[in-house]
Amino acid sequence: MKGFVGTSYDDVPYMAASFSNTHPEVLAVTTLLRGLDPPPLANARVLELGCARGMNLVPMAWSMPGAEFVGVDLSRRQIEEARELASGAGATNVVFHAMDLRDLDESFGSFDYIVGHGLYSWVPPEVQDAVLEVCSKRLSPNGIVYLSYNVFPGWHIGVMFREMMLYRIRNIPDPAERLREVRGFMRFLADSTKSDGSLWSIILDEQASYVEQAKDWSLLHDDLEAENNPVYFSEMMERVARHGLQYVTEERWGTPDEILAPEVWEALDRFATTRIEREQYLDFLRNARFRRSLFCHAGLSLARGPVPDRLERCRFRALVRPFDPSADPFAPGEERFAAAGTRTLTTGDPRLRALLHALYDVWPGTLDYESATRVLAEAARRSGGEVPPLPILGELLHKAVVAKTVAPHLLSVPIATVLPERPFAVPISRHQASRGGLATNLLHQPLDLEPLDRFVLPLLDGTRTMGDVETALVEALSAGRLSPTETGRPLEAGERPDSPAHLADLSLNRLLAGCYLLG
């Protein structure tokens, strides 16, 4: 449906927050495990193409004070908001430019990490080529590029629905009216076919539900933009090769051969003669819609697969917690651990259980490689087996990383593990909380906050004690700026609101657990 006029980012800004998988530390760890030596993070230069309102780049800049950050976006309104955010957060090591990325010349110098999230698929072909040209010319010798993009075969159905929706709104210029019409149109199609119970009716109902629930800015800019150009992975690799770049890996936990069943992997291996072919067949298998790929300069030597011993340079943080922290990891049977959302992990391996308990005991702190492997060795000894050599212990630790139970880190962020006398929250999160919307924590995660926590967080500038927070809560409740029903849970009939002291303690502990406080 070429020729459709999309929604201007000046008219409807893209409201997304930080993306933890784009952080230079994540890119460095991911490529480290592929045998590369990524540029040091301490004084890195980082470029984000299509930086929008700076919600991704400003928190990065605050977390890496010795590094230099540059954001580029065509929308002047969004760049103005990004500059305001940087100023409010006290991030002095980031600059923003309202400009066409095709004007990024040699005066900008080279960059160690280049990030383009939600950009490549939503620009015309000539700009896509310019994105790759910038990545090639502005990337330092050992630098890393992150690009996300839509892929086939998964987007074939998406393109079909996109074209149906664009046809319906082809003569409607107003964004609000466009949204209303698209949602009504898709629901009409779904309801009109629901009675036949066909596969098509089910697919239509899923699409109607999707457009009804999608955020306005996301639907307008992701699905209904003038440009949305998916590509097959193999085609993308041909494009990057023409610009002197090569594929490193995906920014994802684990690799296909560690996730798929061995017999499935063996069958795919018969189809694929190269690593690129293997990835393409995997997209066929998974009906992939989206990729987050890392690239480097062609000619750099890559490992054929993950290199677990590279984890020696990392520290490790738990991604799961035991349901019963007092449980004995060496007791017979299995143990359950809670992960993000509703996901759980059940394991009877005493080595993994001991490691997860040890990491939980220091969370949100970390253990270094020596300490983590020592826990594994002691667990192997106590469970009656032989203590494996260090390389085997490293492989066990790598498996825990692949299984999303443990996260590797190269930066040591001073996250508080106990409530300080005068709590100090990271300035970017205080600024975001005061403006509404998501607030980025010290792990570069954008989290929604309870109204109570949104009120308390901006107060935590290191000058106030818990008593001071309690006093502020009393004043806010008395003045009606904060309602008793906004303090974290609805009140039962006849129930008295919690005391300000209890509310202050509740909120501070939630913010501590959410990794908002500096130690």
Image (cartoon, rainbow, N blue to C red):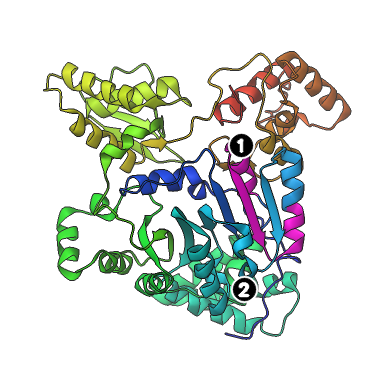
Q: Is residue 402 left or right of residue 407?
A: left
The location of residue 28, given as percent across then percent down, is 43, 45
- Magenta residues (range): 55-81
Tag shown at residue 204: none
Q: Is residue 135 left or right of residue 102?
A: left
Whether residue 129 is in magenta: the answer is no
Q: CA distance from mark 1 to mark 2?
A: 36 Å
The location of residue 261, given as percent across then percent down, is 20, 53
SS category of the residue bearing label 2: loop
Tag shown at residue 65: 1
Residue at the spot x=19%, y=65% of the render? 268
Q: Amino acid at mark 2?
A: Glu
Whether residue 492 appears in this view of the structure is yes
Count of number-bearing discs:
2
SS category of the residue bearing label 1: loop
In which quarter of the view is residue 319 placed? top left
Q: Is residue 94 left or right of residue 515?
A: right
Which image quadrant: the C terminus?
top right
Specify few, some or many for label 1: CA neighbours under 10 Å numbering under 14, 14-19, or 20 or more: some
The location of residue 22, given as percent across then percent down, is 51, 50
* Residue nearer the viewer, 179 or 513: 513
Q: Is residue 40 left or right of residue 216?
A: left
* Residue nearer the viewer, 336 or 254: 254
Q: Amino acid at mark 1?
A: Pro
Residue indicated by mark 2:
225
25 over 317 or under it: above or below: below
Which image quadrant: the N terminus?
bottom right
